[in-house]
Image: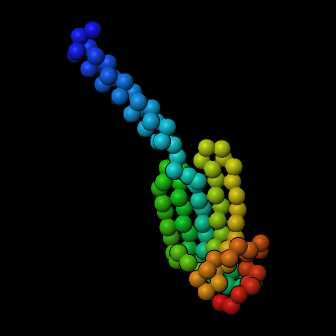
Amino acid sequence: MKVKTVTRLSLAAVVMLLLSTYGHNAKALGPELDRYYYTGCGTVTEVGTYFRSCSGHITQTGSQTGDWREDFTMDCDTGSGSHTIWENCSGAWQLRSTLGDCQCSH
């Protein structure tokens, strides 16, 4: 086999390896995240939103903090999702079961 042929075949193999590696890593950044921020106890008022798509696009509106945070996540590959509620207790987010059921002072 000529040197040029070996070089071309080696180069082709490297290119194929790089393409297959990129294709594997080019999956969605996920999970998709829909986040809502609220203030208040009992009745809450939405004050901001944060959305991150599976492709990594981020959209934000309003305040990015509050007394409460509600997260909806979805796995970009499987479509399975979760829902969590968090209360902001002096800057530390605590997992809660009910939105607006204040357990710390605001």
For the N terminus, give its image quadrant: top left
Instruction: Reply above or below: 22 against 87.
Output: above
Location of residue 84 (image quadrant): bottom right
Q: Is residue 80 above or below residue 86?
A: above
Tell me the quarter of the picture where residue 15 sits: top left
The furthest residue to the bottom = 105
Residue at (27, 19) in percent of width and height:
8
Front residue of 85/2: it is 2
In x, y percent, where is residue 78?
66, 44
Image side of residue 73 versus residue 52, left or right: right
Vertical side of 73 occupied by 23: above or below? above
Q: Report the front residue among 2 and 56.
A: 2
Residue 12: image location, x then y, percent: 33, 23
Residue 34 vs residue 21, the one in the foreground = 21
Q: Nearer the viewer, residue 33 or 25?
A: 25
Q: Is residue 16 left or right of residue 81?
A: left
Q: Residue at x 65, y 61 (%)?
A: 72
- Residue 7 percent across, percent down from the top left: 26, 20
Is residue 46 visible in the rendered structure shown here?
A: no
Image coordinates of residue 38 in percent, x first then y, are 63, 77
Residue at 60% x, 66% y is 35
Residue 35 seen in the figure: yes
Residue ID at (22%, 15%): 3
Q: Quadrant of the C terminus?
A: bottom right
Left or right, 94 with respect to 28, comes to right
